[in-house]
Amino acid sequence: MTPHIPAPRRPGAPEVVGLPDAPHGTWDTATAEYGPVTAAAVRSAAVLDQPRPGTPEPLRSRLAMGLVAAFIAMITIVVWLTQPPATTTPRGDAAPTTGAAPVVVPPASPSTSASPSATPSATVTATPSRRPTTAPPTTTRPTTAAPTTAGRKAPQPASLTVGAQRSLRYASSTDVYVVRSSGVAALAEVTTANGPTLRHAANFTVVAGLARSSCFSFRTGNGAYLRHRNYRIYVEVDNENDPNLFRRDATFCKAAGAPPGSFRFSSENFPEYFIHARDGGLWIDKAPPPHESSFVVSTAWE
């Protein structure tokens, strides 16, 4: 067998430690024979297989792979950033998101059929849900019944009769009467709708004049009388300090009034002074106008 003699090494070329195509070992230059394959020789052969420094091909391959990887990563990030967030179904009365209107399924009302196995049906509507409107609570105010006026009549003109109970209506009005109020005589509107307290305050008992029997006095239910004092008409009881003065102050004489059928009442001790209306009260003044000092004697209030 002819030994394989390697070619002479060129100046500057790296020394070849082993030949990869040697059949069974490496060539020993000292003995000019193949030697056994050692681990060092294998490593040397592997080193020879690596690309030599300065070779541009592997570098370009690595750069290309890096660019491709960077491009793929950038595309992934862009896709992730531009992907719309997951939409959630609005709950309750939340405002619907832009886009298609949410489908709202109202709670099904139970079936009113007699069959217990019937299932309630539900109606699907495509309109957005709105906050349910709550009807304001209905408040019922207690109704106050109007005073019963059935069978009650307003007083009618009547004669001035001693011993009879009468009311004195102001002739210039249809429902204003002389009433007693807190110790004084006043004018007040009295109708069938008023309560008994006001109605009965307009009633007086006609008696013969305390100071002159041909004249008249007007007594209340508690024994007080209409009398003038300091030109005003009061409702007072005789205190017996000056009985004669009280009787004269409480006696009034009638005269024809206006309109016909009405009366005017002058003071027994001041004949020229007549009872007349002034400032919502009753006073005696000298020769007042007839339309301010005329009264219609009427039946008593019930």
Image (cartoon, grey):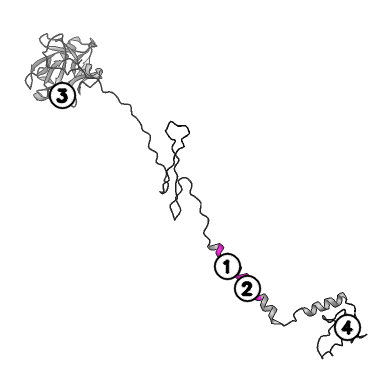
**Where does residue 71 sit, x and y in percent of width and height?**
60, 70
Q: Does the magenta stretch include residue 68?
A: yes
Please state which of the two labelled residues, at mark 1 or mark 4, is closer to the viewer: 4
Q: Name the residue under label 4.
A: 27
**Relative to 63, 20 lies left or right:** right
In this picture, is 108 found above or below 232? below
In this picture, is 186 found above or below 7? above
The answer to the question of whether label 2 and label 3 lie on touching residues, with beta carbons closer than 8 A, is: no
Which residue is at 58% across, 65% downward?
76
Q: Tag 2, which secondary structure?
A: helix
Cα separation, mark 3 vs mark 4, equals: 159 Å
Q: Mark 1 points at which residue?
A: 75
Q: Mark 2 points at which residue?
A: 67
Q: Is residue 232 magenta?
A: no
User: Which amino acid type is shown beneath numbered disc 3?
Assistant: Ala
Which residue is at 18% across, 14% downward?
204
Question: Which mark is first along the chain, 4 or 2?
Answer: 4
**Relative to 59, 86 lies left or right:** left
Question: Which mark is first along the chain, 2 or 1?
Answer: 2
Magenta stretch secondary structure, dominant: helix
Q: Give the range drawn in magenta.
A: 63-80
Cα separation, mark 2 vs mark 4, equals: 45 Å
**Where does residue 214 sit, x and y in percent of width and height?**
10, 9
User: Which amino acid type is shown beneath numbered disc 1?
Assistant: Ile
In this picture, is 114 found above or below 171? below
Identify which residue, 290 or 56, lies in the foreground: 56
User: Which amino acid type is shown beneath numbered disc 2?
Assistant: Leu
Q: Hey, which quadrant is residue 60 in on the image?
A: bottom right
